[in-house]
Image (spheres, rainbow, N blue to C red):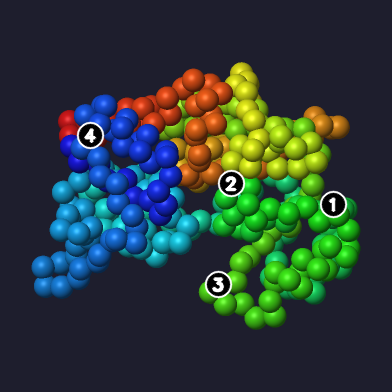
Amino acid sequence: MKLAIFHMEEIPTLFMLEKAARKVGFSPYLFHLRDMRFFVGEKGFDIKVGNVSIKDFSLIFVRGFWNYQNEVSLLGKFCDTYHIPLFDTAVRTNPIISKNDDLFLLGRRGLDLIKTIFLENRGAEELLMKQFRFPIVVKEVRGKRGFDVYLLQNKKQLQEFLRANIPPGKTLATKTYQFQEFIPADFDVRVLVLGNKVLGAIERRSADPHDFRHNISLGGFARQIPVTPEMRRLALKAAKILKFEFAGVDFITHKKTGKMYLLEVNRSPGFEGFMKATGIDVPLELMKFFLRFVRKKLQ
């Protein structure tokens, strides 16, 4: 059984996935998304990497595709045409990477989200100051691993940010930002979901007490915590709404009121810190999940 793992950057977790795939019996291939070639003609539609046709694979897993959304959209249509399993399901049904889009889908289903405004008007400081108290959190809608996230402390910083980052006219290269209420918290929680199962949860804390971001990728540290029934219910619900079979669901709890909010759902979560804190072999669990799916399909 041939498994294709598409990616946009070579990171250590890719080779962990490749090793786990071999362990359960797959023949894994690591493909960079830039190397896909699309063929349309009298013989139909094909996607190849080099001389290898994607038609020959038992399952395809897309591991991150920030800069390749158009290509992945075509890949989804291709897999639908030839009945090739493609994960996550959202790659086929909604191949858009955007915090805006995710929050819209989650918000209309009634989950407790942090107050958020999306805008592209550099003269909107009055609106933002009316809706929020400082500090204000700003996130680029396609940001990842805690990068492109800022904390604005006052009106001057807000004005400077708007002038520097929101141009008068929008282009394809223009970044889009969301502005959020700041929730004071000493940590956040990552719940890892696979299929209809929660693998576990970790508490993440920043190594710098002055940094409000708790991402492990920024130097934060983690420890395993019990998964509460509420965490389990909300994490599974959020992943199901977005159709993510593999997801990192992040929560934050207000340290004064005790209210828990859903921060975001990561469709391509990092898992090295999670593995270190919990001892759970995430790549192996993921490949076992894929293997069960392929065997069920063959039956």
Type of amino acid under label 4: Phe
Q: Nearer the viewer, residue 65 or 85?
A: 65
Identify whether 161 is placed above or below 79: below
The image position of residue 96, as x and y in percent, is 48, 58
In the image, what residue occupies the spot 52% across and 25% down? 276
Identify whether 52 is placed above or below 269: below
Task: Give whichever of discs 4 and 1 has the lower sequence position.
Answer: 4
Which structural element holds mark 4?
loop
Say which residue label 3 marks. 173
Task: Give whichever of discs 3 and 4 has the lower sequence position.
Answer: 4
* Rendered image quadrant of residue 190: top right
Say which residue label 4 marks. 26
Identify whether 93 is placed above or below 38: above
Type of amino acid under label 3: Ala
Task: Give the Cα distance between marks 3 and 1.
Answer: 28 Å
Task: Give whichever of discs 1 and 2 has the lower sequence position.
Answer: 1
Labels 4 & 1 near each other (Cβ < 8 A):
no
Determine crowd level at label 1: few under 14, some 14-19, many 20+ residues with C-alpha closer than 10 A.
some
Which structural element holds mark 1?
loop
Task: Give the Cα distance between marks 2 and 3.
Answer: 20 Å
* Rendered image quadrant of residue 152: bottom right
State the quadrant of the N terminus: top left
Say which residue label 2 marks. 145
In the image, what residue occupies the spot 84% across and 58% down? 131
Determine crowd level at label 2: few under 14, some 14-19, many 20+ residues with C-alpha closer than 10 A.
some
The image position of residue 98, as x and y in percent, is 55, 57
Say which residue label 1 marks. 135
